[in-house]
């Protein structure tokens, strides 16, 4: 039942059915913006039928409806498994209208029935208190893309297609969105799409000419320049211009048929014919007027085809009788009496080209990825944990050990292909190269003899665009798979806004019982602030965790494993979790091993615990001071300080507390992982000084603990935005996080200690001064620092 790619168009009856479906979608889209009653216009339109606040975006909706109608046709004719990513931000009216037409909306929300009453509810709830947003949102059936922020649609689409060989992912890209940096980079996703193991992406660039108040660049450049741009990015564009076509439906049908047939041919030649060169995938460029089919002019000003059609083309309808009549004429131009039955249901003609069951765009299970999600076959941690006979005597590179663990995950998913590692050109740099024994790096572009680990079927994804990596992984997770994003700590900030949107998506879906839980979005942040020996100040920023911990507490988690075994246990935990955003900060440089596998398991389960072997308290009384730490470098400096106190002030009762899960510091009322007050007080006491060495900006710890009883006794050392290209120990000295400064803090804050430990404090300060001279003369740290091990 395929259509010939070179035929002039469809049969007259087919075209009429497509036009009826399109008119119905346009009518429902406009109705959502304006109407709260009289949904079928069976009585004269009156002010009380109009919403008090007119909100929404009309301008893009008719073009989106055209795409939706023609996707419906090819899906039904060819039995295609298809999802669509709707990039134009506020195209919500269109997608809601079409899911109501195909019945998927009513199946999820039975009160919005497919009749006149349900149509009235559909209209009223749009952009209305207690209703639904004006953009494509988690509440929208068939959506895997939050339309509230622009730039990510195409990378989401490619992520959805990865390892989904039978899936076609259509992606409508607004010409305003096409001006964003993330979207500009994501055109290159076609160089990573494996025609054998992945599905296909069909980009549809929607040129309607305007943003809110300005023209769009791609709609105004010459046609040959646009064509060169798209072909230069490796695409094979097909053009549909509704303004210069005798029949927009016929032109769109030919373009859609041609695109899906080319996709099928390319996949066949790769899967069955052994073709290995990179495909030049088709795309569609659709030109249509902004606000197409809406009011041509209002008060003598042109509206259709201009920026004035972007949002609400007719304002003040309740107050102005002439505008009310103009709205009525506009809505009646779609001839709703032909489109809906007496009871308000879509007519047979409207539904003639609409798919059924899970083939509907509003009901495809890939757009509700939790339905397809399987648990990861994670390896036995005992295969990877390191032996620790005594704390602080041997070292490992934590992320290198993690790389071997991830290789096992990739190997275990070799056939099912539902786990990917993504990152911006840093897999080797972050010491994760062990993964290459299981898979290579995805690559469809040119190969040279000097290349290493490039693989046309690889599942490690590297592109020097954090935005694109994030978008790929989000699309992959949202369609029911698993993954990990590895990134330099300082540059995770590049995706701050993207992670915001994903967290908001997850928080919203937690309240929708029809949305099934997804695998968590997991970050591994390494090459961190304290070890930038050659990159220096530009690579020193630990603030991504501050940003994440501002977000929905039920969704976000931040882990700072202090050594290799704790990193492995944290990795196992986050890869098993659902509906969370997990940030794991771990160093890649050799780090002392502190905990055995069993101890690491217990410590990670607690999230924060006393390391009794590191302190000097005897249990008969509360400690004189608590040394707390979070992060690998702060942990080492804290334990070194504890060793100095043990040697020089043996009578001092010192407790050492390590925090691996930062949320534990928050009260239980503010975060589900927060410690109850009694448990927090048992760790940190209520009245003893706490010297807290923290990986990042110190004020975060104060913010997390400001409601705790002993907050007034808390003194936090951390990164103070002081950095350079320098030695590892000089970095901690510059930021007053070093062991000698921590000892001085103890002396300054334990009551009565400053008077009897004056000489020790002076000695500590002298070592810091000697360090400053030494490091500038020798370029290395003091021998007592580089040769230090835990004294036991």
Image (cartoon, rainbow, N blue to C red):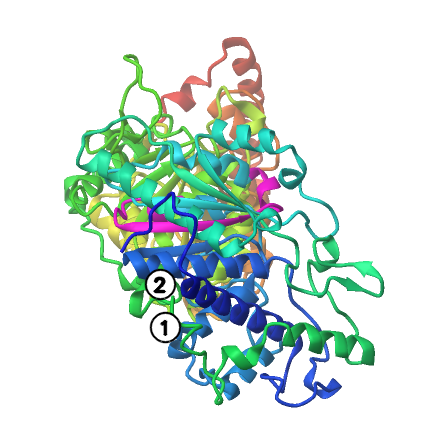
Label 2 sits on a secondary structure element that is helix
10 Å crowding of disc 2: few (<14), some (14-19), many (20+): many
Q: Is residue 611 magenta?
A: no
Res. 453 mark: none
Q: Circle 1 is placed at which residue position?
A: 514
Q: Where is 561 relative to 675, above or below?
A: above
Residue 624 rendering spot, x and y as whole percentages: 47, 52
Decide which of 350, 29 is in the foreground and name it. Answer: 350
> Left of 310 or right of it: where is 509?
left
Looking at the image, which residue sits at the far top?
777
In the rendered structure, are the residues bearing label 2 and label 1 in contact, judged by CB atoms less than 8 Å apart? yes
Res. 368 mark: 2
Residues drawn in magenta: 158-181
Q: Which residue is depicted at the point 28% across and 43% down?
A: 264
Q: Where is 535 relative to 596, above or below?
A: above
Kindly tell me whether residue 318 is visible in this rendering. Answer: yes
Residue 719 rendering spot, x and y as whole percentages: 56, 38
**Between discs 2 and 1, the one toward the N terminus:** 2
């Amino acid at each position: 039942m395929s259509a010939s790619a070179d035929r002039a168009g469809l049969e007259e009856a087919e075209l009429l059915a497509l036009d009826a479906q399109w008119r119905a979608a346009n009518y429902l889209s406009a109705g959502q913006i304006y109407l709260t009653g009289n949904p079928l216009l069976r009585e004269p339109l009156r002010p009380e039928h109009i919403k008090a606040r007119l909100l929404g975006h009309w301008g893009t909706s008719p073009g989106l409806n055209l795409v939706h109608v023609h996707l419906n046709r090819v899906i039904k004719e060819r039995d295609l498994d298809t999802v669509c990513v709707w990039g134009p931000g506020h195209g919500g009216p269109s997608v809601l209208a079409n899911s109501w037409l195909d019945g998927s909306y009513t199946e999820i929300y039975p009160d919005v029935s497919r009749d006149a009453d349900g149509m009235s509810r559909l209209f009223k709830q749009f952009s209305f208190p207690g209703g639904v947003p004006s953009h494509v949102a988690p509440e929208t059936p068939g959506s895997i893309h939050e339309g509230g922020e622009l730039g990510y649609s195409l990378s989401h689409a490619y992520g959805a297609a990865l390892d989904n060989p039978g899936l076609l992912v259509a992606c409508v890209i607004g010409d305003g969105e096409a001006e964003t940096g993330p979207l500009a980079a994501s055109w290159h996703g076609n160089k990573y799409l494996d025609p054998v193991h992945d599905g296909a992406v069909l980009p549809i660039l929607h040129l309607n000419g305007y943003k809110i108040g300005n023209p769009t660049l791609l709609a105004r450049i010459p046609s040959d320049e646009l064509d060169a741009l798209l072909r230069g990015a490796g695409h094979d564009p097909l053009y549909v211009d509704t303004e210069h076509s005798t029949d927009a439906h016929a032109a769109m049908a030919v373009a859609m048929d041609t695109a899906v047939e080319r996709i099928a041919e390319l996949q066949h030649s790769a899967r069955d014919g052994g073709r290995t060169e990179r495909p030049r995938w088709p795309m569609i460029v659709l030109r249509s007027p902004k606000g197409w089919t809406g009011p041509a002019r209002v008060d003598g000003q042109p509206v259709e085809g201009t920026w004035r059609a972007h949002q609400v083309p007719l304002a003040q309808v309740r107050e102005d009788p002439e505008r009310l009549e103009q709205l009525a004429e506009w809505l009646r131009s779609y001839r709703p009496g032909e489109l809906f039955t007496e009871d308000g249901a879509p007519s047979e003609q409207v539904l003639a080209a609409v798919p059924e069951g899970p083939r509907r765009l509003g009901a495809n299970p890939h757009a509700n990825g939790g339905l397809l999600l399987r648990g990861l076959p994670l390896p036995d941690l005992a295969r990877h944990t390191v032996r620790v006979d005594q704390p602080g005597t041997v070292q490992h590179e934590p992320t290198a050990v993690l790389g071997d663990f991830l290789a096992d995950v990739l190997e275990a998913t070799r056939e099912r292909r539902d786990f990917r590692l993504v990152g911006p050109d840093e897999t080797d740099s972050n010491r994760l190269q062990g993964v290459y024994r299981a898979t290579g790096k995805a690559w469809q572009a040119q190969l040279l003899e000097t290349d290493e680990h490039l693989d046309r079927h690889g599942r490690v994804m590297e592109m020097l665009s954090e935005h694109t990596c994030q978008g790929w992984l989000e699309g992959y997770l949202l369609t029911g798979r698993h993954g990990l994003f590895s990134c330099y700590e300082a540059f995770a900030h590049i995706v701050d806004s993207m992670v915001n949107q994903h967290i908001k998506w997850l928080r919203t879906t937690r309240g929708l019982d029809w949305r099934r839980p997804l695998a968590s979005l997991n970050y591994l942040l390494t090459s961190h602030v304290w070890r930038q020996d050659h990159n220096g100040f530009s690579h020193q920023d630990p603030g991504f965790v501050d940003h994440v911990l501002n977000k929905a507490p039920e969704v976000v988690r931040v882990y700072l494993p202090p050594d290799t075994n704790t990193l492995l246990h944290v990795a196992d935990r986050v890869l098993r979790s659902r509906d969370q955003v997990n940030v794991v900060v771990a160093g890649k440089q050799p780090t002392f091993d502190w905990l055995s596998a069993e101890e690491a398991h217990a410590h990670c389960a607690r999230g924060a615990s006393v390391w009794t072997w590191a302190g000097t308290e005897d249990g008969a009384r509360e400690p004189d001071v608590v040394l707390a730490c979070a992060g690998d470098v702060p942990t080492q400096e804290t334990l070194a300080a504890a060793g100095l106190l043990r040697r020089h002030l043996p009578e001092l009762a010192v407790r050492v507390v390590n925090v691996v899960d930062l949320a534990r510091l928050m009260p239980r009322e503010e975060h589900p992982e927060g410690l109850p007050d009694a448990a927090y007080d048992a760790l940190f006491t209520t009245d003893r000084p706490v010297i807290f060495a923290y990986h990042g900006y110190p004020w975060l710890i104060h913010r997390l603990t400001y409601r705790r009883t002993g907050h007034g006794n808390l003194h936090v050392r951390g990164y103070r935005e002081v950095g350079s290209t320098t030695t590892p120990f000089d970095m901690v000295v510059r930021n007053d996080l070093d062991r000698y400064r921590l000892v001085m803090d103890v002396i300054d804050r334990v009551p009565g200690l400053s008077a009897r430990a004056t000489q020790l404090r002076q000695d500590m300060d002298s070592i810091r001064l000697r360090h400053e001279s030494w490091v500038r003369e020798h370029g290395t740290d003091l021998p007592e620092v580089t040769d230090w091990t835990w004294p036991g």
